[in-house]
Image (spheres, rainbow, N blue to C red):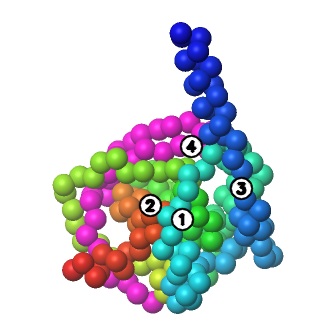
Amino acid sequence: MVKYLYLILMLMSAMSCSEGFTTAEREVINAGQGDVMYVLSIAHQSDSVVLRSQSKPLTCQMVSSEEFATLRRRMLATVQSPEHQGVGIAAPQVGILRRVVAVQRFDKADEPFEFFINPEIVEFSDEVAAGGEGCLSVPDIHDDVIRSQRITLRYYDENFEQHEQIIEGFTAVIFQHEIDHLDGKLFIDYLEEK
C-alpha cells in the first residue's frame, strides 16, 4: 500500500512539473529589444482586459526554464528602469498571466528585490493602516489604501521549494498590492470601496 501511495505521489509531482510556457507567453517574454518590457496600462482597453484576468500558477518545469530566467531578468529590469521605477511588479503587468511577483524587501538589509512564485497570503493581521499607493499600470493616480500591516505569506522560491513567512510594515503592503495583480484586482478598486 505504501509503495502505491509513493508511486501516486511521484506521478502527481511529475504531472505538476510537466507544463511549460505557452508559445504566446514565450513570444511576450522575448518581445522587443533590450531588457525593459512593455508595461500594460489601464489606459488601453486590451491591456485592461489582461490586467483584470486571473493568473495561473507556475510549474516547476517553468521555473527551471530559460524562459523563466529571461522573464525574471526582464521584469527586474523593467521595475528598476527610470521609466517605470517601482517597488514591485507582477507578471500580469508585463502581459504574462502567471503567478510570479518581484518585491523590493525594505525589511531586509540592502533592500533587495526578490521573486516569489505562486505566492498566497494565508493570514492578514487585524491591524490596518492607510498608506499612499500608486501603480505602474495605473498612470497618474495615487491615493491612500487601507492594508493589513502584517501578513503570513506562503510561496515557492526559485528552486521550487515552499516557504511560509510573516512580513510586516511597508513590505507587507507591497505584497498585498502585487498579489492583487495576480487575481485581476487593482489598488483603484479599493478607492471605489471608500
Ranked by sequence position, the earlier of labels 3 and 1 is 3
Q: Is residue 94 above or below residue 69?
A: below
Residue 77: x and y in percent read 66, 68
> How many angstroms separate mark 4 from mark 1 (CA)?
15 Å
Instruction: For the residues labelled 3 and 4, say whether their Cβ atoms are less than 8 Å apart.
Output: no
Instruction: Tell me the kind of residue under disc 2.
Output: Ile
Above or below, comparing residue 132 to residue 63 in the picture: below
Type of the residue with mark 3: Phe
Kindly report the distance in space between the C-alpha atoms of the residues bearing marks 3 and 4: 18 Å
**The stretch drawn in magenta includes residue 191:** no
Q: CA distance from mark 2 to mark 3?
A: 20 Å
Q: Which residue is mark 4?
A: 157
Among numbered discs 4 and 1, the one appearing first in the sequence: 1
**Quarter occupied by residue 16:** top right
Check contact, mark 3 vs mark 1: CB within 8 A. no
Residue 151 shows in this picture = yes
- Residue 21 tag number: 3
The residue under label 2 is 179
Image depth: mark 3 or mark 1 in front: 3
Query: Which residue is labeled 1 in the image?
Result: 90
Residue type indicated by callout 1: Ala
Q: CA distance from mark 2 to mark 1?
A: 7 Å
Mark closer to the chain start, 3 or 4: 3
